[in-house]
Amino acid sequence: MQVIQKLVRAGMVIAMGTFALACNAEQDGSARALEGIVYSCPGADLAALSASLHQYFKSLGVSPDDYSEHLDAANATLQFLRTDPDRGTDTLGLSFERGIELREELVELPAAVKKPRTVVTVSKKEILLALLQPGRTTGFSGAACKQQALQDHIGVRQNIAAWSESIELHWPNGRSAHWNRKYWDHGNLKPHADLQAAVNDVFLNPQKYSIGCYTATKLIMVQGVLDYYRRIKKDPVTAQLVQARLMLDGDPLTYIEPGAAWYFEKESTGQDLARAGKLMVMNTRVAADNFVPGDWVYFLNTDMRTYAKTGYEGSNAIYLGRGKFDDYYNDNNHNYTYREKLQEVYEWRHDVFSRERDVAKIHPLTAAEIESLGRAPEHGGLELEYRMSPYFFGFADLPAVVVPTTAQ
């Protein structure tokens, strides 16, 4: 608590009330009082919508016994929620839960050679069950009052996880980032370079890239979304919509997330906090143990000394399902558990920047101490109380993004 008070005095954390007002919640703002999957659809045929959703749930192996449905005709809402009180808000243990028979899925991804490669990734069923879990709201309204909006959302999330599974980038470790100059100029897309080819190259030739976790996370989000609409759904109209939004300022890697995501940084201004993201939206007030595969999560380093070390301000992470978070640099066999991720960020204050090299400096923590790290920073932990995920492209009225006239 003393650390976060110092950060507040240093201007790194603003009032949480202001943060909540500044957050972009386009996808769930109509259903803040409810949890799970909520459709708010005045004027829609709720019976037909309900029937199509039941059919989709069944196609993923989720039966009516796995969730409850509540129809509020007065407010034209449909809510779907897992209701067993013993389950609470925790989604990390879904794959170990008895009775729901979760299995990983095999998906094909493009490879540097002509033959695609197969990766093992999270199932669509697990993503759906995580969305149904108490602890957050995923809201659909307006043009998103369709079963297809949820189906696309789950498909995008699985594709994000799939591209995250086994990528192995180089860590700059304080040095300048390195990019394949065929497509990129210090992280900026070269004039006349094709965006799809440039982003694909990061994943097909990762040995040519040395980048930090923030940039890596943005690239995976861009790849996961664009690749879903182009290659998987084969929806060129929506793919072009996504690409045009990314290229608003000529730089596809700037401003993809809402400005409010960095509310704790002292440089953040009111204008920054109000800025919508090109690609991502925030889901606020999420329970600490509630993660949906494909979430972009941030663990804040609250130690002021090591926060000042470039690359160690915090950890941008993607939840892969099955209780695992990404490991872009293969420092931990391609993934971290939740406890490992919390301890990784915590140990930076003890100068543990390499588990192999700095093993003697590790300060072992008890289970209770690690659990406390899952609290919000203002309560002594490291985990921010929001998650980021892509817009419902093709089904949402996208907010305007105010960007500088030149890329930064």
Image (tube, helix red, strand yellow):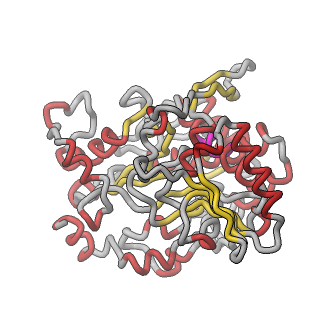
Q: The N terminus is located in which quarter?
A: bottom left
Q: Is residue 220 visible?
A: no
Residue 379, compared with residue 288, is above or below; it is below
- Residue at point 51%, 53% (across, down): 83
**Residue at the spot x=56%, y=57% of the render?**
36
Indicate whether 292 appears above or below 248: above
- The x and y percentages for residue 26 are 63, 69
Going 33% across and 50% down the picture, which residue do you hit? 312
Q: In this view, does 204 lie to the left or right of 238?
A: left
Q: Is the magenta stretch mostly helix, strand or loop?
A: helix
Image position, residue 160 (x, y; %) = 60, 42
Q: Give the range drawn in magenta.
A: 155-160
Q: Is residue 196 left or right of residue 13?
A: right
The answer to whether residue 165 shows anywhere in this view is yes
Q: Which residue lies furthest to the front in this view?
A: 65
Which part of the image, by quadrant, shows the C terminus? bottom right
